[in-house]
Amino acid sequence: MGQMVPPRSIQNEDFWKNPWDVGGLTVIGLFTSTFLLFVLFAVVFGYVEKAVFEEE
């Protein structure tokens, strides 16, 4: 019979210990959230402007 292999941790602790990796993830998250907020702003502003022109 073969030996059982111990299960590896799903989350890599080395990633969270490296400040450059965490900083890169933070920057990517900020860019993504900023982009989504700009899209949300454009959609909301488009609907508001459309509603204002329909009232006139």
Image (cartoon, rainbow, N blue to C red):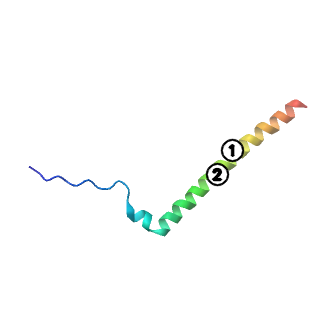
Which residue corresponds to the image point at 39% horizontal and 65% vertical from the top-left?
14
Q: Which residue is mark 2?
A: 35
Q: Residue 1: where, in percent of width, then height?
A: 8, 49
Which residue corresponds to the image point at 69% horizontal and 49% vertical from the top-left?
38
Which residue corresponds to the image point at 56% horizontal and 58% vertical from the top-left?
28
User: Which of the 4 quarters of the picture holds residue 18?
Assistant: bottom left
Q: Residue 47: where, in percent of width, then height?
A: 77, 37
User: Which of the 4 quarters of the picture holds residue 46?
Assistant: top right
Using the image as rendered, state which of residue 39 and residue 11 is in the foreground: 11
Q: Residue 45: where, in percent of width, then height?
A: 77, 42
Relative vertical location of residue 18 with respect to residue 28 in this rendering, above or below: below
Three-letter residue code for mark 1: Leu
Q: Is residue 56 left or right of residue 28?
A: right
User: Which of the 4 quarters of the picture holds residue 11?
Assistant: bottom left
Three-letter residue code for mark 2: Phe
Relative vertical location of residue 30 with respect to residue 1 in this rendering, above or below: below
Q: Is residue 29 left or right of residue 14?
A: right
Label 1: which secondary element: helix
Q: Which residue is mark 1?
A: 40
Q: Residue furthest bottom?
A: 19
Badge 1: residue crowd in 10 Å (few <14, some 14–19, many ≥20): few
Mark 2 vs 1, N-terminal side = 2
Relative vertical location of residue 21 with respect to residue 11 in this rendering, above or below: below
